[in-house]
């Protein structure tokens, strides 16, 4: 690993994890307070507040991927492709199961599903190219 890549990885980890910590705090605050907010416009603004750190985290991910070499970018591409396929397949399957009477799941769970699938995709692609 080059010094430049090490610096990019460190910067990514600090900024990404910082954004995710802010996101976690905002999710807890939003979850506890949204029922007590009266005007609808205020509820909308409060519910969208956690999107800001998610945007920061994703922009840091894009910046980090841009700093990678060709093989590492290929691993990231395959991870994103895997995550997209798994998320589409599993969310579609659950939608069909809902039609069969299983409980409805909130759409907000698609993001953690994609994130977990992405992690699996990175693991899978990394093993493939070792």
Image (tube, rainbow, N blue to C red):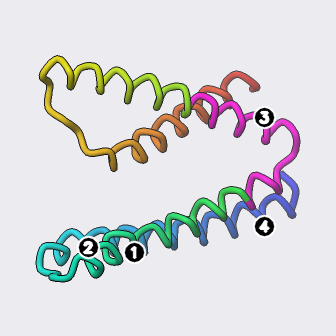
Kindly identify which residue carries mark 3. Answer: 74
Question: Quick one: label 2 or label 4, which is nearer the N terminus?
Answer: 4
Which residue is pictured at 78% across the width and 34% down the height?
74
Which residue is pictured at 49% across the width and 34% down the height?
117
- The local secondary structure at tag 3 comes to helix
From the viewer's side, name the closer residue of 38 and 112.
38
- At label 1, counting other C-alpha atoms closer than 10 Å, the crowd grade (few under 14, some 14-19, many 20 or more) is some
Position above or below: 3 against 78: below
Closest to the camera, between mark 2 and mark 3, is: 2
Q: Is residue 125 left or right of residue 101?
A: right
Question: Quick one: label 2 or label 1, which is nearer the N terminus?
Answer: 2
Label 2, label 3: how far apart the Cα atoms are: 37 Å
Residue 81: give x, y in percent of width and height: 63, 31
Dominant secondary structure of the magenta stretch?
Answer: helix
Which residue is pictured at 32% across the width and 45% down the height?
107
Asked whether 67 falls inside the magenta stretch, the response is yes
Label 2, label 4: how far apart the Cα atoms are: 34 Å
Cβ atoms under marks 2 and 1 closer than 8 Å: yes
Asked whether 71 falls inside the magenta stretch, the response is yes
Position above or below: 85 against 65: above
Kindly identify which residue carries mark 1. Answer: 49
Q: Which residues are magenta?
A: 63-82
Which residue is pictured at 47% across the width and 40% down the height?
114
Kindly identify which residue carries mark 4. Answer: 7
Residue 32: give x, y in percent of width and height: 16, 73
């Amino acid at each position: 690993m080059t010094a430049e890549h090490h610096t990019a990885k460190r910067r990514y980890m600090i900024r990404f994890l910082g954004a995710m910590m802010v996101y976690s705090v905002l999710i807890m605050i939003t979850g506890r307070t949204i029922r007590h907010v009266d005007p609808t416009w205020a509820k909308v603004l409060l519910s969208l507040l956690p999107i800001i750190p998610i945007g920061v985290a994703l922009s840091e991910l894009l910046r980090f991927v841009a700093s990678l070499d060709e093989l590492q970018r290929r691993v990231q591409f395959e991870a994103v492709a895997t995550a997209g396929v798994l998320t589409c397949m599993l969310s579609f399957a659950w939608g069909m199961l809902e039609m069969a009477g299983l409980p409805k799941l909130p759409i907000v769970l698609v993001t953690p599903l994609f994130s977990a699938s992405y992690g699996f995709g990175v693991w899978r692609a990394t093993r493939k190219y070792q």
